[in-house]
Amino acid sequence: MVLLPIAAVTATSLEGGLGAFWKAVTADQAVAALKLTVLASVIVVVINVVSGTAIAWVLVRDEFPGKRFVNSLVDLPFALPTVVAGLVLLALYGDNGILGISGVSFTKVGVVMALLFVTLPFVIRSVQPVLMELDTDMEEAAASLGARPWTIFRRIILPNLAPAIIAGAALAFARAVGEFGALVLISGNIPFDTEVSAVYIFSQIESANMESAAAVSVVLLAISVGMLFLIKLLGRWTVRHGR
Amino acid sequence: MAASTSKNIVKGGPVARIGLRSVALGYLAILLIFPVIVVFYKAFEDGWSVAWEAVSNPEAQHAIWLTILMVLVAVPINTIFGIACAIVLVRHRFRGRGILNAIIDMPFAISPVVIGLSLIILYGSRDGWFGQDLAAMGIEVIFTPVGMALATMFVSLPFVVREVVPVLEEIGDDQEQAAATLGAGPWQTFWRITLPSIRWGVTYGVVLATARALGEFGAVSVVSGRVAGSTETLPVYLRRVFESFNEAGTYAAAVVLALLALIVLAAMNLIQRRDRAILAGAGVAAEATVVPHTDVPDEKESA
């Protein structure tokens, strides 16, 4: 069910030999799409690491009315179909959108915003349980010894959260690299500008260019499977060092 | 647990705390809340009747029906497979267990478009690996609901497994062994002992899989051929009417999908609350919503 399709894509990508594979992957448009995919995913992951950790912190340690509602809202991007996600961002931030901001729809900014939307829950949901389990004894001890809040965060909290942050970031990255639905509407899919690899693959399939689509797919697969592998390694490392 | 000591937590100054709170909530508002309000606003901008007309035309009706059909096919199959797979992963030790574990997560790491492509390569009726033989038997997969169901199954495959595995690990197999010593057969043990204890994990996985199946776009777009009134699911329909500048139709379809998403979200929360009561922090899913006891009075979910 899972392995066969992957084998099929890999085999098809190599049907014309390694030379054809290389040519398909290094075609100008394919390279531009891959570059944008990786760049946008990296930006999205960096923003997610900061905002996700901050939101998780607020949801665990802070108290305010409506906290439970906000907490349940975080899962919205998992529940909302991605096409709708793209559409709502367009309706709000598009050129003819309600806020009337230009420079979001059909630009790289739009790509990043759409990816931010769909990957929002990963880091939060990964950090939250760890932060909840984290005992405050160490923090109190540090504070009584005169450490400032920022020092406590950097030296005590961050090292404890790091594995969870990295795991969430890896999942977000894998998701961002492959995202298609949220981007179709808001990015405009302009070749050499806002076209990500998933959209490029789609257009290659549409023009019955299966070998080329498969070749780029293999590269995307390698990137996200590499990420998944990294999570596994990290998970093992965390179990060994965390207990 | 840290939750009960949240009163004497080191919080930093009030300025820093409220600052961080506003930034975090502001970020969520800009990214999540405003956009969703906008869809509802846009859909009903021209009145209820316009919105109703937009979803009641035959093509939209067919798309809604087909979307539900996909869920009804993919989710039950994945649920049965998911439970079986989770039991195998947790209760048995065998060679290749690590590999199986990794393979199950693969659909999370593969782009939906690539999943669609692989299905075309395998089952395309002209030059697919198995497609020609299947076509000879009269079974067309690509550009039919069969292929769309396969694509939907693929993308929603890992959810049930991932939710059930931590619960199974948490409960251990003491009760199952006790049942076995008292003479219960494997089936009896499963129905009377295992299934009742994992039911909330299963339900949560089903909800997540349903959400994914409802909204799947990439993989379904590729394999369906996107024939209006025939192989269009609601997300695919939405994109087509969007591209034909039919604004009322687009937002009406979006509202239907958003409403389904909100129902799913509400279900997720109900289940997580039960989880909290029953398992007190078994899996990640359960832990994610364990709220400190010093919590503010319950907010009614607006969902």
Image (cartoon, coloured by chain):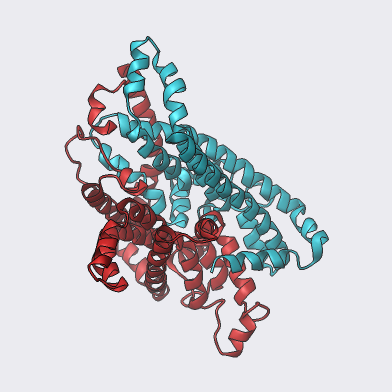
Relative horizontal placement of residue A4, taking residue B67 as reference (left or right): right
* Position in image of residue A241 (x %, y %): 48, 34
Farthest residue to the top: give it: A146
Image quadrant of residue A71? top left
Residue at 69% over, 70% down: A208
Image quadrant of residue B2? top left
Relative horizontal placement of residue A209, taking residue B125 as reference (left or right): right
Q: Nearer the viewer, residue A112 or B170?
A: B170
- Note whether residue B231 is visible: yes
Q: Nearer the viewer, residue B111 or B196?
A: B196
Q: Colour of chain A?
A: cyan
The number of discs equals 0
Residue at 43% over, 30% down: A160
Chain (red): B
Farthest residue to the bottom: give it: B137
Residue at 64% over, 72% down: B121
* Position in image of residue B280 (x %, y %): 25, 45
- Note whether residue A48 is visible: no
* Position in image of residue A92 (x %, y %): 43, 45
Farthest residue to the right: give it: A19
Q: Is residue A190 above or below residue B80?
A: above
Residue at 66% over, 46% down: A193
Q: Nearer the viewer, residue A129 or B66?
A: A129
Q: Is residue B118 above or below residue A186?
A: below
Q: Quadrant of the C terminus of chain A?
A: top left
Q: Nearer the viewer, residue A24 or B205?
A: B205
* Position in image of residue B13 (x %, y %): 32, 16
